[in-house]
Amino acid sequence: ELKVEQNPLFLSMQEGKNYTIYCNYSTTSDRLYWYRQDPGKSLESLFVLLSNGAVKQEGRLMASLDTKARLSTLHITAAVHDLSATYFCAVAPIIVSKLTFGKGITLSVRP
Amino acid sequence: EAGVAQSPRYKIIEKRQSVAFWCNPISGHATLYWYQQILGQGPKLLIQFQNNGVVDDSQLPKDRFSAERLKGVDSTLKIQPAKLEDSAVYLCASSFRREPFYGYTFGSGTRLTVV
C-alpha cells in the first residue's frame, strides 16, 4: 500500500525567512503533485513533477522531485502572509492514475 | 474553461438518512474521481470512472455508498444510510486522460455534516 508522509504537519513561519517542507512516499512513482488548500476551499494545483530531478518554481515556491530517494521538497523563499494555507503532496504510482495524498502541512506566516 | 461543478455546497442530515451529491466535470474530461476529505486529513479516493465505467472503487464502502456516471458526463454519489463518520467534504475531480500528466482539477466540494 502506498504511503505518503509529510512533515512537519504544522509550521509557523516568520515573514521574510526561508523554509523547506518535505514529502516522502513509499512506492516507486514518477508523478508527484503539490496542492494548496485554503480553509473551507477546494484544492488548487501548484506543481506537477513528472520526472527525477524535476524542479518547478512559481513565485516564492519551488518544488523538486528525487524519485530515487522518493522525496519531494517544497522550498519557500521569504515567506509572506499570503502563503498561509495547507499544502498537500499527492503521488500517483507508475501506471496507476489515482492519487494518494499526504495529511497535509499547515503553514502559518507570522509578522 | 468552466471548472468542475458540484452541488450542493453544504448539506446537513441526520444519521440513517440518505443524501446525494452531484458533479459535472470539465467538458471533455473522460476521467472522474470522487474523493472524501475528513477534517484534518488528506483526500481519499472513493471511486474513479473512465467515461461511464468504474476503474477503481476499492475504497468505496459499498454497503452504504454508491456512485454512477450515466452517459459518461455527470456523476452522482449517494450515501444511504449515512453515519456520523461520513461527515466530510466530498470532492469531485476530473482529468482529460486516465494518465493525468497535467494534473487533476478539483471542484469546490460538498461539505456534509451528519448529526
Image (spheres, coloured by chain):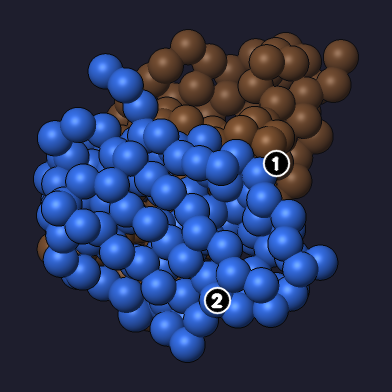
Chain colours: A brown, B blue
Same chain, marks 1 and 2? no
For the C terminus of chain A, give its image quadrant: top right
Q: Give how far apart the Cα atoms at labels 1 and 2 are.
A: 33 Å
Q: Nearer the viewer, residue A58 or B114?
A: B114
Visible in this render: residue A103?
no
Circle on res. A106: 1
Quarter of the N terminus of chain A within the rendering:
bottom left
Vertical placement of residue A108 versus B115, above or below? above
The relative height of residue B6 versus residue A83 in the rendered view (above or below) is below
Could you say which is closer to the camera, residue B83 or residue A13?
B83
Q: Amino acid at mark 2?
A: Gln
Residue B61 relative to residue A19: left or right? left
* Residue for point 68% across, 15% down: A82
Furthest toward the bottom, the residue is: B63
Q: Secondary structure at mark 1?
A: strand
Closer to us: mark 1 or mark 2?
2
Give the x, y percent position of residue A51: 20, 43
Tell me: A32 left or right of A15: left
In the rendered image, residue A77, in percent from the top left (x then y), is placed at 58, 18
Q: Which residue is mark 2?
A: B80
Of the numbered discs in the image, which one, if any, rests on residue A51? none
The subunit carrying tag 1 is A
**In screen coordinates, is A101 left or right of B2?**
right
